[in-house]
Image (cartoon, rainbow, N blue to C red):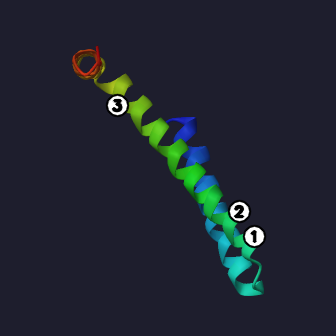
Amino acid sequence: MDSDRIIGAGREAAGNVQEGIGSLIGDNRTQARGQMNQMRGQAQNSVGQLEDYIRDQPIQAALIAVGIGWLLGRLRII
């Protein structure tokens, strides 16, 4: 397991608590910050999952990257 996944899960949990506290005391700003921290945690967790996938399946990940690059090259506008 990657440190990004651990930190992301922690940030997501803390954001969930922060949102709950904001909801409990009626503070919209605290609620919004909690939701933002949850999204940041989910994004960081996703980065960690991607890193794990690349580490576990390097050839398949490289082929996917080449395929995406080829598709983006074909989509260029003249």
Crowding at label 1, few (<14), some or many (≥20) Cα neighbours within 10 Å?
some
Residue 77 visible to the viewer = yes
The kind of secondary structure element at disc 3 is helix
Q: Are marks 2 and 1 in contact (CB under 8 Å)?
A: yes
User: On screen, 43 above or below 66?
Assistant: below
Q: Is residue 34 left or right of residue 75?
A: right
- The residue at which mark 2 appears reads as 33
- Identified by mark 3, the residue type is Tyr
- The residue at which mark 1 appears reads as 30
- Identified by mark 2, the residue type is Arg
Residue appearing at x 57%, y 45% in the figure: 6
Q: Position of residue 73 (x, y in %)?
A: 27, 15
The kind of secondary structure element at disc 1 is helix
User: On screen, 49 above or below 41?
Assistant: above
User: On screen, 53 above or below 23?
Assistant: above
- The residue at which mark 3 appears reads as 53
Of circles 3 and 1, the one toward us is 1
The kind of secondary structure element at disc 2 is helix
Q: CA distance from mark 3 to mark 1?
A: 34 Å
Q: Is residue 64 left or right of residue 38?
A: left
User: On screen, 47 above or below 32?
Assistant: above
Residue 1 visible to the viewer = no
Q: Quadrant of the C terminus?
A: top left
Looking at marks 3 and 1 on the same chain, the residue that comes earlier in the sequence is marked by 1
Q: CA distance from mark 2 to mark 1?
A: 5 Å
Q: Position of residue 45 (x, y in %)?
A: 50, 45
Of circles 3 and 2, the one toward us is 2
Q: CA distance from mark 3 to mark 2?
A: 30 Å
Residue appearing at x 77%, y 79% in the figure: 27
Question: How many marks on residues?
Answer: 3
